[in-house]
Image (cartoon, rainbow, N blue to C red):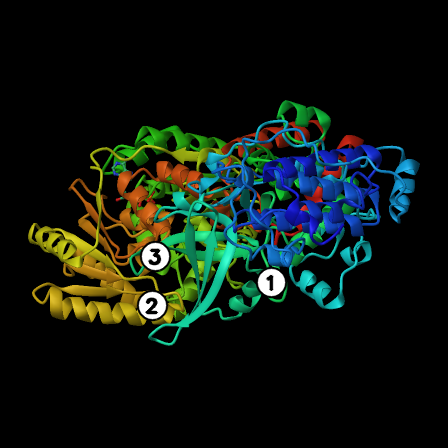
């Protein structure tokens, strides 16, 4: 091959030569990867062919990339590697970003090639201004002698390997053979990401062969650094991520995927888009802003437009980018307006051509990192772990269940969760892994329930029908149908020798307290003792008062035990509980302190149960001998989820409000002026208002301090003519009680409070709830605040003040303003954020869910159903077909902190 020949030979259109590459590659495959399908070897041959073209910034990266691929191909020692490399070449050729962008011919002329540039991939990128060849002229290749013989070569090694194995190797990566298409960022978290645009065609992915290329691991619990080569410094960091074994690596799941299938053409970028772009890196500049910040600015072009990408205060990026000028770069991020023109703000970037295509082809996994590990390294390592370890994965879910619920096999799900072929597969994989987690939860819960049901018996508590009728007669209102229904369920539980373990769910204001009072009455009338524990002193005092109101007419004494009950009073309560003369004891955590003993505690009620840890609830239970337990919560949990989350309990729901309640008018306003005008109007009409201060994260103390300041401000500047009170968590019990009494009596008109008002306070005359910086509170909490009003017959209002809320914050505020039905809100929360968000509300030592954080109600129901089937047929998971499942359940629960 002489240096001058390329200049004189007329070159065919570039597409013809590109097509030739494809045909040579296919021939290479047929011939067994010997690097003989083109004279002198693939790289050399095409270096010569492409040397005939003048390339521009669109075509250069493609050609340059191809030549690099071919060069690498030449250097590869195994058939498997070479096969993978042919995939990469074919994919690059299929990339529509290139085929589409080859412009229509202006004429058939072939641009001159400077000998200085010919064949030099690096310099080709810098050649400018040739005429791009025509795609229309694609035809059969004519100019190539592509069948050659006689080249002696190290390739014979590869050939020999191939001959030995006798089959065409299909590396794992072959499933990524789908064409490389443009990029958007797929995010589990954001449903509005551009992923919806691209659905993978079913069957697009080649069948998976697991574990080719990387030596297989021996066992799933083999240390990863024994299965793969990992340097000590990186090993240490992997351990920090909790990745120690091969299996850990398989379950180290990506938090996200880049969608490198459909990049947005640069001329289609619009303001506010969040996506990935792919193009040639044209230039890299660095400049200082007036405030001495550094901006690294890159220009990226894809033939449709040029876009500026700006890195803010990341000088090192310039150093990384500069050597890659002329190459293809993929950048994920979003668009912004900067100095009047569209600019791309990067989040992440990489060079698709630099590596084999695990970083830029298809849906590319993005893993949570720790300091000192790069995404690229981790992605490569997990990829190797998958290759080495997937083959060892056994299926824990029995065949019948898997068939009935149409679940992917576990091994397939793990593979696809890391490297899905498309959205559909990713969903199926997520579903399967979420199912597994929820199945472990459900089985654990069902067994827990079975354990206590089969444990020692409780004292049965019979109730007298006429007593309950009298109880209702004594009330100032009629019980709602829902209250009656749940009360029946509770009383019939209590009549049995199996200890009750029931969760009573009811929206704020639905009237749970009176139901608990009726149950306590039944216990007391049976000559036994009952106790109710509340999370705050205020609530405990309020309960003591309302219990006394309904129970004293029956001759039943109600005693109170909180941290504020001291000295002889406390002694008296201790003695009364211990000798059984106190039939009903209301209190806070003080109830579960060591000194407290009961003579015959038969019913333990825990109000706002999610505010207690499982250990605290267990302690209360231990104060009696297998007492019946009633847990109450106003945090609505979607029904589907509560079956799983509270699978060890029986769940009753009060789904009806007391009659005469008007819906609370909720609005979301940016300015306080509107809010305070309404407060004033309502106070003038004889009503009262709450103002909840912003959340202060650091501590209760600083939150209290902020509330003190806010009360002063409101009293002095906004409501000088009204009485503005203050309530916060750091006040003494007696102080709180006297403030609350003044508020209840109407002496205080506006009560400034921290989030302590969240729980339970019941002042029906209060009709306005103002929440400052509402965007900082969660949905459930906001709903709780709102529940403090609307407790009487008057129209009530909830005003959410929020300026500059984030998108997620706005979504929450919108949701809360749109309905005051807590269960609807909970469903919405489940839809928006998935079951993982509800986990904390149980606080039961249920291990964290890693996959089921994604909204997938179907998985919740299926897992519950499957768990029931398994436990019904084999409660101890002792059958051989449940062996693996039993191990998984065991492992899952051992991750939880404590068990009750
Ligand atoms: P929560 O379920 O949030 O604990 P409470 O038990 O505090 O609700 O009840 C809220 C208010 O509704 C209380 O003032 C209570 O007296 C009143 N209430 C409860 N049941 C009824 C009913 N059936 N009819 C009218 N008012 C009721
Ligand atoms: Mg309550």
Mark nearer the viewer, 3 or 2: 3
Q: Which residue is mark 1?
A: 370
Q: Is mark 3 within 8 Å of ligand 1?
A: no
Q: Nearer the viewer, residue 826 or 122?
A: 122
Tell me the residue at 45%/31% (across/down): 489
| Residue 451 in view of the camera | no
Q: Mark 2 Cα within 10 Å, few/some/many (few <14, many 20+)?
A: many
The disc label shown at residue 120, or none: none
Give percent across and percent down for residue 377: 66, 58
Task: Give SS at disc 3.
Answer: helix
| Image height of 431 relative to 588, above or below | above
Q: Which residue is mark 3?
A: 776
Task: Give SS at disc 1.
Answer: loop
Could you tell which of marks 1 and 2 lies nearer the N-terminus? 1
Mark nearer the viewer, 3 or 1: 1
Q: Which residue is mark 2?
A: 703
Give percent across and percent down for residue 355: 66, 53
Give percent across and percent down for residue 308: 42, 57
| Image height of 233 relative to 33, above or below | below
Could you tell which of marks 3 and 2 lies nearer the N-terminus? 2
């Amino acid at each position: 091959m002489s240096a001058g020949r390329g200049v004189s030979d007329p070159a065919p259109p570039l597409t013809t030569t590109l097509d030739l590459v494809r045909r040579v590659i296919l021939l290479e495959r047929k011939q067994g990867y010997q690097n003989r399908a083109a004279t002198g070897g693939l790289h050399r041959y095409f270096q010569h062919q492409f040397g005939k073209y003048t390339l521009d910034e669109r075509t250069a990266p493609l050609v340059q990339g191809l030549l690099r691929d071919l060069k690498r191909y030449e250097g590869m020692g195994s058939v498997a590697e070479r096969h993978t490399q042919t995939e990469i070449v074919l994919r690059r050729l299929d990339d529509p970003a290139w085929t589409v962008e080859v412009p229509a011919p202006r004429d058939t002329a072939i641009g001159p090639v400077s000998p200085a540039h010919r064949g030099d991939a690096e310099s080709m990128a810098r050649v400018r201004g040739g005429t791009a060849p025509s795609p229309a002229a694609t035809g059969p290749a004519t100019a190539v002698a592509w069948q050659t013989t006689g080249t002696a070569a190290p390739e014979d090694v590869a050939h020999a390997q191939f001959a030995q194995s006798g089959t065409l190797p299909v590396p794992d990566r072959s499933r990524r053979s789908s064409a490389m298409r443009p990029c958007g960022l797929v995010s589990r978290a954001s449903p509005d990401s551009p992923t919806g645009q691209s659905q993978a065609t079913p069957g697009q992915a080649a069948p998976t062969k697991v574990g080719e290329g990387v030596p297989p691991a021996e066992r799933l619990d083999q240390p990863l650094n024994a299965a793969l080569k990992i340097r000590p410094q990186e090993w240490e960091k992997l351990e920090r991520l909790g990745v120690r074994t091969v299996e850990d690596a398989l379950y180290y799941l990506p938090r996200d995927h880049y969608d490198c299938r459909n990049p947005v053409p640069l001329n289609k970028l619009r303001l506010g888009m969040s996506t990935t772009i792919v193009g040639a890196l044209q230039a890299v500049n660095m400049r200082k802003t007036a405030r001495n910040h550094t901006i690294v600015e890159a220009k990226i072009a894809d033939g449709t437009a040029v876009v500026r990408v700006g890195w803010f205060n990341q000088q090192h990026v310039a150093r990384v980018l500069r050597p890659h000028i002329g190459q293809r770069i993929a950048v994920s991020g979003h668009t912004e307006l900067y100095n009047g023109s569209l600019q791309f703000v990067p989040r992440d970037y990489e060079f698709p051509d630099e590596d084999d295509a695990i970083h830029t082809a298809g849906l590319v996994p993005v893993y949570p990192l720790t300091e000192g590990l790069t995404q690229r390294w981790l992605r490569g390592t997990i990829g190797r772990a998958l290759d080495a370890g997937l083959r060892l994965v056994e299926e824990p879910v029995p065949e019948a269940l898997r068939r009935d619920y149409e679940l992917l096999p576990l091994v397939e799900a793990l593979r696809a969760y890391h490297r899905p072929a498309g959205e559909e597969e990713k969903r199926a994989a997520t579903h399967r892994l979420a199912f597994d987690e929820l199945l472990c939860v459900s089985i654990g819960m069902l067994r827990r329930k079975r354990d206590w049901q089969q444990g020692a018996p409780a004292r049965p508590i019979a109730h007298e029908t006429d007593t309950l009728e009298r109880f209702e007669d004594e009330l100032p209102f009629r019980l709602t149908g829902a209250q009656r229904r749940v009360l029946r369920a509770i009383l019939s539980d209590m009549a049995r020798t199996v200890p009750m373990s029931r969760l009573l769910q009811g929206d704020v204001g639905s009237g749970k307290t009176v139901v608990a009072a009726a149950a306590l009455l039944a216990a007391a009338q049976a000559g036994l003792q009952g106790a109710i524990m509340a999370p705050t002193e205020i609530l405990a005092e309020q309960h003591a008062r309302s219990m006394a109101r309904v129970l004293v007419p029956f001759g039943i004494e109600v005693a109170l035990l909180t941290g504020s009950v001291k000295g002889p009073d406390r002694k008296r309560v201790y003695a009364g509980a211990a000798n059984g003369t106190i039939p009903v004891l209301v209190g806070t955590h003080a109830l579960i302190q060591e000194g407290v003993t009961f003579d015959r505690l038969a019913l333990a009620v825990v109000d706002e149960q999610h505010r207690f840890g499982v250990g605290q609830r267990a302690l209360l239970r231990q104060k009696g001998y297998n007492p019946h337990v009633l847990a109450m919560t106003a945090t609505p949990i979607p029904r589907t989820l509560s079956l799983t989350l509270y699978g060890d309990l029986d769940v009753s729901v009060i789904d009806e409000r007391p009659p005469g309640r008007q819906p609370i008018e909720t609005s979301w306003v940016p300015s306080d002026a509107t809010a305070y005008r309404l407060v004033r109007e309502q106070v003038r009409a004889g009503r009262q208002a709450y103002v909840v201060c912003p959340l202060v994260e650091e501590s209760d103390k600083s939150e209290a301090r902020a509330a003190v300041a806010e009360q002063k401000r409101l009293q002095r500047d906004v409501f000088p003519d009204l009485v503005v009170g203050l309530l916060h968590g750091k006040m003494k019990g007696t102080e709180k009680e006297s403030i609350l009494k003044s508020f209840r009596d109407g002496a205080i008109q506006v009560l400034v409070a921290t989030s302590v008002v969240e729980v339970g306070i019941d002042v029906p005359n209060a009709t306005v709830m103002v929440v400052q910086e509402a965007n900082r509170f969660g949905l459930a909490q906001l709903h709780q605040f709102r529940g403090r009003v609307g407790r009487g017959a008057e129209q009530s209002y909830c005003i959410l003040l929020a300026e500059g809320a984030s998108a997620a914050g706005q979504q929450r505020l919108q949701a809360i303003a749109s309905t005051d039905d807590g269960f609807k809100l909970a469903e919405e929360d489940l839809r928006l954020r998935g079951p993982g968000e509800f986990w904390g509300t149980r606080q039961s030592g249920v291990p964290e869910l890693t996959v089921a954080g994604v909204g997938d109600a179907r998985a919740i129901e299926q897992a519950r159903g499957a768990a029931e089937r398994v436990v019904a047929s084999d409660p101890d998971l002792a059958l051989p077909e449940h062996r693996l499942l039993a191990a998984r359940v065991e492992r899952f629960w051992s991750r939880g902190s404590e068990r009750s």
